[in-house]
Amino acid sequence: MARRGSYAKGVARREEILESALDVIGRKGYQNASLKEIAEVVGVTPAALLHYFGSKEELFTEVLRKRDEHDDMDPAFLDTAEAKSGFVDVIRHNTEVPGLVALFSRLAVDAADPEHPAHRYFLDRSERLRETFAGSFGAGRLGRTSFDADTLARIIQAASDGLQLQWMIDPSVDMPAIMEALIDALQPAAPEPSSD
Amino acid sequence: MARRGSYAKGVARREEILESALDVIGRKGYQNASLKEIAEVVGVTPAALLHYFGSKEELFTEVLRKRDEHDDMDPAFLDTAEAKSGFVDVIRHNTEVPGLVALFSRLAVDAADPEHPAHRYFLDRSERLRETFAGSFGAGRLGRTSFDADTLARIIQAASDGLQLQWMIDPSVDMPAIMEALIDALQPAAPEPSSD
DNA sequence: GTCTATACGCTGATAGAC
DNA sequence: GTCTATCAGCGTATAGAC
């Protein structure tokens, strides 16, 4: 409402397109998610999609960005145990949205090209994750080995992304359990409340 | 030689195509590595490529398979220290063949589709890696946490694949150093020879 | 601002000529 | 066995209807 009646329609259309795109990816796989397919679900022509988003790559990047708002762990600084369970919950939730995992992984590869619209997204996301992890897990100290916080964060991120690749090829892989085991292992033997 | 003059040409062409494909990917990126581009380098038409390999996907899968013969760590069972340095060497070598890393990562995503020719390749590779790691690293015991050998292997594989994604987006990421830190951390406090 | 109609160049793939 | 000619489908650009 407001803004004199119009262009609320455009906003709604944008949402509709983003949802339909993710829906098609989930049902038919990323490869078969053509603009034509998505446009048919929405009930418009492919050119209409390009009116709102400049290109297919930008459209898909936007799907990812939008989903990040809800699904991602951006809670400021949690203590270690909360951060762990929160992160594992995100992983567990991902097993219920295979289309999103496929989209994320595919764009992570394509975005290697600095010209790709998702390139900045992945750079920013990585930096953000490292900050969050640094705050939550701190520097890792482990047996005779020690990491700086940055290395620890990169390892957790890498393991998470890599597990998704394994899971897409073999969905019997238990991502949450493996991630939990890893995070436990990388924790220094810190005093842990017996509550949880 | 031998085999009555002919069809040695075909074998040579196959090799030539596989090498040119990897070359084009390295120079122009996976996205721009069209059959047309590769065919031009070889000096034939795109259809000639499809004569030798049934489809683009099969061609690229074959490039990956071929490279695995040399580059991969298949030495039987090494002791822990040798396995670690051998694995880190493979990672280090990968930083010198960005085209191969791009190809591997792209196919790892596409192969989620069970119909993709690389699907079996990735299933087999994952199983082989798990066996190798189990033999070399054994089950991990770490502080108060312990893994079975399978979980440990999946973590190392996931971290390795995930680091490649990070490295492709930001080549300043030091893959070998991070992998070495991780493997060190996941090792139980085993007696290590002071030689190395 | 929202969208259709139309057209273009390029892709991977096919049928069949040599 | 080797490859040319041809094809349908893709993402995209543009002009202009509403």
Image: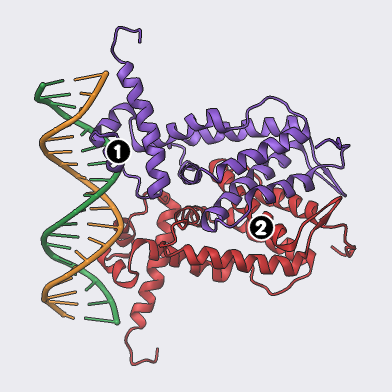
Chain colours: A red, B purple, C green, D orange
Q: In the figure, residue A8 lies in which quadrant?
A: bottom left
Where residue A109 appears, x then y in whole percent?
Answer: 48, 52
Q: Position of residue B25 (x, y in %)?
A: 40, 44
Check disc 2: other Cα within 10 Å, few if <14, some if 14-19, many if 20+: many
Q: Label 1 is placed on what type of residue?
A: Val
Quadrant where the N terminus of chain A lies? bottom left
The answer to whether residue A172 shows anywhere in this view is: no
Label disc, if present, on residue A154 of the rendered structure: 2
- Residue A33 vs residue A124: left or right? left
Question: Split into 4 quadrants, where in the image is the C terminus of chain A?
Answer: bottom right
Give the residue drawn at x 79%, y 65%.
A80
Give the residue number, with chain letter if any, for mark 1.
Answer: B41
Q: Nearer the viewer, mark 1 or mark 2?
A: 1
| Residue at 46%, 41% in the rendered image | B113
Is B27 on the left or on the right of A174, as rendered? left
Gap between marks 1 and 2, in whole Å? 38 Å
Give the x, y percent position of residue A187.
Answer: 81, 57
Seen in the picture, residue B1 relative to A93 is either above or below; the reply is: above
Position of residue B148 measured from the top left corner of the image (x, y, whole percent): 77, 38
In which quarter of the view is residue C17 placed? top left
In the image, what residue type sits under mark 2? Arg
Q: Nearer the viewer, residue A185 or B193?
A: B193
Residue lying farthest to the front in this orientation: B195
Lateral position of residue B102 relative to residue D3, left or right: right
Tell me whether the residue at label 1 lies in contact with that at label 2, contact meaning CB atoms closer than 8 angstroms: no
User: Which quadrant holds residue D3?
Assistant: top left
Number of residues whose C-alpha sits closer than 10 Å to that of mark 1, classed few (under 14), some (14–19) or many (20 or more) = some
Secondary structure at badge 2 equals helix
> SS of the residue at dot 1?
helix
